[in-house]
Structures are given as structure tokens and as C-alpha cells.
């Protein structure tokens, strides 16, 4: 921060002009000087100092009391000058922090990125949008060598940096499991132990894990307290909640999980979501799950990726483009 | 942020009753934690949390109850939640926390 | 060793005494009015710290000369509790009493050099120099 001195000659010129003519132009010039002073970190006491000097040059016989009182004012302004400097340094710090967080958010994106698989006969769409810079939701696709498709969807309590850190832990634990141990219930049991041992007592994670067998089109799944998703049955054009009960990850050390299974027919769909979808605020009330289904139904005929994006846009608009929670929606359609 | 939560604590012999009013979210959860956790650290204490006037709770609130439950196990105290409104009760059901936290459903709160 | 001008800080009004002595020395050295006011404010902050956190201590002044430059050195010494986390108190935005602009970061800004030594349990010594421009 370079300090520049206020130009005494200019100041004196404008002050004189003002004292003689009460001219608005001179006041406008003073305003410009004031702005320039802020830009160049000239402190208030320095401006007063320049004022005193200019005044004494214009009026060499300035009354002693006036001169003293201006010195008094100068003393009174010292702390304002300091506060201004501190404010500026805090602002610089804030922007440094912001750029650090945005670097971290980009890193998180790279670390947690998942490739949406291309599987014949399956149409997959996924969208995940954080409320703040860092995402506390996480989804991941895992293609097994035996033709199964694993789908993990998790939501960490809270938002922001702590949630994002916990998410990275989940992702790396999951990567370390050998392929033969990737059964939904088994995965949740192992992850539960990881979370229970490693995070703060009040931190927990909800998670859904599904495994889609592309040969016989059965979908087996387990849930650790995750917001229930839906099956869509084309035959009856109806939705049904994905029923899987299980305790959230991190609440006890010995949680056990049930595994359920469902056969998926042509035209059926699997809809997975986080509570950022169902906890959407509409003014001071919440959107009911039925209303969410109505919206999903409106777009379900579209290709899956287009459908999830349309649904997201719909809720984004409903909430005035300001998400309160991270939002994740995945749709899997079995093509006819 | 508007802190929209009030907590009333009543203590009798070996029992602490917390009556909570308002919304439990990321901003108010620390207050709940501050009042609830010390009670759970008393040996053999029976803690009752009345949620009749809790209109909204998010996952941060659940986190506080999980950490309170862990503390009761450590200190030999007990925790019971009573008078849950439907929306709040649903959260405990979805997360299956109702399987490990004692919830008295005989007195259901007003909808 | 020559006797240095010194003010003992025991009560709030001693802060005024320290300011006054410091301002006299600053005038003698030829500091302008703005710098005089800055020096006085720095003395205030240092003396106030002693009064608030250590209870008892002293502020003394030294005329310094470096490569023909003249300056005033303020030294504040106390045997109070000391400062546990120096980097924290030197951080902008950290203040137990004053709000924006107060505290040791303020002193550092007002003066040209700033040095602090503190041991937890053994007291604190801060010295700061302002050069005549």
C-alpha cells in the first residue's frame, strides 16, 4: 500500500475558491480529492493537517483558538484513520480467503468427479449443485467388471468446508474396498465404521447405495437414513417410494443394514435425491414430496440428463435462485 | 441471523426437562447443544426433551441429538424425546434414529 | 547508563501522563503535528494494554539516532501474565476491547518499527520507533 500525499497546492486553491465564492465547483473538486484520498490511503488526519496548513497560508493571522481546535480535531480523527487501514487490510484478507476456498472447491470437484457411465439400455441423468461453494452432497458411479453398476449417493450433515472434507473421506474409503465387497449393505456397514471412528460426534452422513445388475435388471439397494427416492412404474404410470430403512452413518459403531431388491422393467425409472430437493422452501413453507413428484413427472419423458436439469431449474426458480441446501438428483431410466 | 429458538430448562431430582420452542437449524443448534449436553453428562440423569413447539428441525438438530445420545451412553444417563410434531418425527424415522433414540409417541404434538 | 524519561502505569490517568511526556519528547525532536498525534495514540494503546492486562508496568522513551536519522523509541514493559498467542494479538480483526483500529496492530501501523517479546507467565516488552521525516 503506497501512501501518497494530498496535493497541498490543489487543496489550497480549491479552499480559497470556495471561501471567496462559495462556488459549487470547488465543493465538487473537494469531493474528487476526497475520493482520490481514499484510493491512495491518505488518512483523515492527513487531510485535516493539509487543511490547517492551507488555512494558515491563506490567513496568516488565524485566530489561535481556531487553529487549536483544528489540532484537536486532528487528534480526534487518528483512530478513524487506523480503523480505515485495518478495514482495508481485512478486505484484502477476505478476498485472499475467498480465492483459497474457490481453489479448494475446484480441487474437490476434481477429487470427487465421477464419470457418468454409458450403458446400453440405460439412460442416466445426474445433477448436483452446492448451496455454497463446497458441495456436501456426493454421488458416484462404479462400473463393476461383472456388468453391475454401483450408484452411491450421500449427504453430509451441514454444508461448506467441513461437509466437503467428510465427503472426500467417504470417497476414498469407498475406493479402497475390493470389488467383491461392493454389496450395498456391506459397503454401508464398512463406511459406518469409518465415519463413526473419524468424525465429530454430532456429524453424520446419510447415504444410499444401489447396485444395478445390467444382465437381469434387478436393482439391489440399502439405505443409511437417506431421504427415500422413488421407483417409477411405466405399466401403471405410478410412483412408489423406495423403501429401505437403515441408520445414518456415524451414529453407532455396529449398525447393520438390510438389502432390498426390485426388478426394473422397460420404461421404469429409479429416482434418487438428497433432501435439498424435498426441503426446498417456498416462501415460509416447504414443498411437499407429492409436489416434487408432480414436477419430476412433468419432465420424466425427456432424456434423463435433460429431465434432471429441467427439474433443478424448476426448483431453482421456485426458490428465487437461492438454494438453501445442496441439491442432487439422479434419474435412471430403463429404455424400452 | 434471527435466532428463533427458546429453551426452558427445569431440573428436579435426577430429572432434567428441556422444553424447546422454535426452529432447530444450523444457527440455533449450538444453543441446544449448549443446554442439552451438560445434562447428559450427569450420571443416572433422566433427560426429557419436549419438542411440542418445535416447528422445524434440520439435520444439524439431529446431529445434536446423536451427540447427546452418545454422551448418555458414556455417562449412564437416559434421553427421551416427547411430543414430536409430524414433520420432525418423520426426520427421526427416515434416518432410523428412532431405533436408537427413545421417542415417546403416546403424546403426539399438535400438527 | 543515562536515566531515561519514564512513566509508571498503575491507573488509567497514568496513560495521560505517558502521552504528555511522549509528546514533549516528540516536539523536542521536531516531529510535525500529525506524527505527534500518531505517537501519542501509540503511547495510549501501549499504556492502556499495560493498565488493562498487566495492571502495573512502565513506559519509557529513548531518543535514537540511526545513520543520521533521528527518532523516538517508545518502550512498554510489564511483568503481567504475558501473551499466550502473539500471532493472534497481532492479527487484524482480533481485539478484546477496542474494535476496529485498536490494539497492537494499530500501534504497528502508527509507528515505523515494532518489536514485541512476551513469555507466558513472565510479562511483555514492546518497543516501537518513529523516525522524524
Image (cartoon, rainbow, N blue to C red):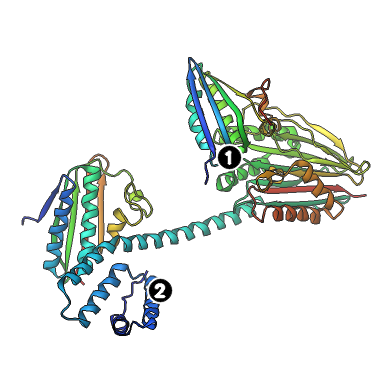
Quarter of the image where the N terminus of chain A is located? bottom left
Task: Say which residue appears at 56% left-offset and 34% top-offset.
Answer: A202
Q: Position of residue B18 (x, y in %)?
A: 53, 26
- Within-10-Å neighbours for mark 2: few <14, some 14–19, many 20+: few
- Provide the residue designation for mark 2: A35
For mark 2, give the secondary structure: helix
Give the Cα separation between the discs numbered 2 and 1. Answer: 43 Å
A233 over A32 or under it: above or below: above
Residues behind callouts 2 and 1 on a single chain: no
Between A277 and A160, the one nearer to me in the picture: A277
Q: Position of residue A274 (x, y in %)?
A: 70, 43
Task: Say which residue appears at 25% left-offset and 72% top-offset.
Answer: A49
Chain label for disc 2: A
User: In screen coordinates, is A53 left or right of A228?
Assistant: left
Q: How many numbered discs sit on the rendered protein?
A: 2
- Provide the residue designation for mark 1: B25
Task: Say which residue appears at 38% left-offset and 70% top-offset.
Answer: A38
* Visible residue check, residue B33: yes
- Within-10-Å neighbours for mark 1: few <14, some 14–19, many 20+: many
User: In screen coordinates, is A218 left or right of B42?
Assistant: right
Chain label for disc 1: B
Amino acid at each position: 500500500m503506497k501512501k501518497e500525499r494530498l496535493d497541498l497546492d490543489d487543496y489550497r486553491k480549491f479552499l480559497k475558491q470556495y471561501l471567496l465564492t462559495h462556488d459549487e465547483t470547488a465543493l465538487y473538486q473537494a469531493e474528487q480529492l476526497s475520493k482520490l484520498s481514499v484510493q491512495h490511503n491518505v488518512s483523515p488526519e492527513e487531510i485535516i493537517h493539509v487543511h490547517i496548513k492551507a488555512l494558515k497560508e491563506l490567513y496568516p493571522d488565524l485566530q489561535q483558538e481556531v487553529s487549536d481546535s483544528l489540532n484537536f480535531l486532528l487528534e480526534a480523527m487518528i483512530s478513524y484513520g487506523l480503523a480505515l487501514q485495518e478495514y482495508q487490510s481485512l478486505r484484502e484478507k477476505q478476498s485472499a480467503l475467498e480465492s483459497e476456498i474457490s481453489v479448494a472447491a475446484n480441487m474437490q470437484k476434481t477429487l470427487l468427479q465421477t464419470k457418468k457411465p454409458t450403458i446400453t439400455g440405460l439412460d442416466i441423468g445426474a445433477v448436483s449443485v452446492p448451496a455454497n461453494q463446497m458441495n456436501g452432497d456426493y454421488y458416484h458411479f462404479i462400473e463393476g467388471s461383472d456388468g453391475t453398476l454401483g450408484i452411491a449417493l450421500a449427504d453430509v450433515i451441514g454444508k461448506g468446508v467441513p461437509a466437503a472434507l467428510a465427503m472426500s473421506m467417504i470417497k476414498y474409503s469407498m475406493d479402497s474396498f475390493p470389488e467383491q465387497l461392493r454389496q450395498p449393505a456391506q459397503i454401508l456397514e464398512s463406511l459406518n465404521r469409518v465415519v463413526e471412528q473419524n468424525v465429530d460426534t454430532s456429524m453424520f452422513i446419510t447415504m444410499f447405495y444401489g447396485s444395478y445388475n445390467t444382465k437381469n435388471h434387478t436393482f439391489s439397494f440399502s439405505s443409511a437414513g437417506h431421504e427415500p427416492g422413488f421407483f417409477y412404474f411405466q405399466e401403471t404410470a405410478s410412483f412408489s417410494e423406495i423403501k429401505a430403512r437403515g441408520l445414518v452413518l456415524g451414529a453407532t459403531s455396529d449398525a447393520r443394514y438390510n438389502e432390498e431388491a426390485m426388478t426394473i422393467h422397460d420404461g421404469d425409472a429409479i429416482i434418487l435425491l438428497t433432501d435439498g430437493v424435498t426441503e426446498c422452501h417456498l416462501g415460509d413453507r416447504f414443498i411437499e414430496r407429492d409436489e416434487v413428484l408432480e414436477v419430476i413427472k412433468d419432465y420424466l419423458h425427456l432424456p434423463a440428463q435433460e429431465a434432471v436439469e429441467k427439474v433443478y431449474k424448476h426448483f431453482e426458480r421456485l426458490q428465487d435462485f437461492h438454494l438453501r441446501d445442496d441439491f442432487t438428483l439422479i434419474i435412471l431410466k430403463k429404455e424400452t | 441471523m434471527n435466532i428463533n429458538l427458546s429453551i426452558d430448562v427445569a431440573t428436579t431430582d435426577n430429572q432434567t426437562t428441556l422444553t424447546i420452542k422454535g426452529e432447530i437449524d444450523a444457527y440455533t443448534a449450538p444453543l441446544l447443544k449448549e443446554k442439552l449436553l451438560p445434562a447428559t453428562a450427569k450420571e443416572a440423569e433422566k433427560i426429557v426433551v419436549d419438542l411440542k413447539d418445535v416447528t422445524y428441525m434440520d439435520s444439524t438438530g439431529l446431529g445434536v441429538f446423536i451427540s447427546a445420545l452418545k454422551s448418555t451412553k458414556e455417562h449412564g444417563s437416559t434421553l427421551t424425546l416427547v411430543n414430536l410434531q409430524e414433520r420432525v418425527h418423520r426426520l427421526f424415522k427416515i434416518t432410523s434414529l428412532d431405533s436408537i433414540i427413545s421417542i415417546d409417541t403416546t403424546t403426539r404434538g399438535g400438527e | 547508563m543515562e536515566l531515561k524519561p519514564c512513566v509508571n502505569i498503575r491507573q488509567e490517568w497514568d496513560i495521560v501522563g505517558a502521552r504528555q511526556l511522549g509528546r514533549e519528547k516528540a516536539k523536542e525532536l521536531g516531529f510535525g503535528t500529525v506524527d505527534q498525534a500518531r505517537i501519542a495514540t501509540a503511547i495510549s494503546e501501549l499504556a492502556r494494554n499495560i493498565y488493562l492486562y498487566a495492571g502495573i508496568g512502565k513506559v519509557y522513551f529513548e531518543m535514537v539516532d540511526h545513520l543520521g536519522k533521528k527518532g523516538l523509541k517508545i518502550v512498554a514493559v510489564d511483568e503481567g501474565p504475558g501473551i499466550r498467542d502473539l500471532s493472534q494479538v497481532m492479527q487484524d480483526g482480533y481485539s478484546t476491547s477496542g474494535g476496529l483500529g485498536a490494539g497492537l496492530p494499530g500501534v504497528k501501523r502508527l509507528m515505523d518499527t515494532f518489536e514485541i517479546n512476551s513469555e507466558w507467565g513472565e510479562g511483555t516488552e514492546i518497543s516501537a520507533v518513529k523516525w522524524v521525516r
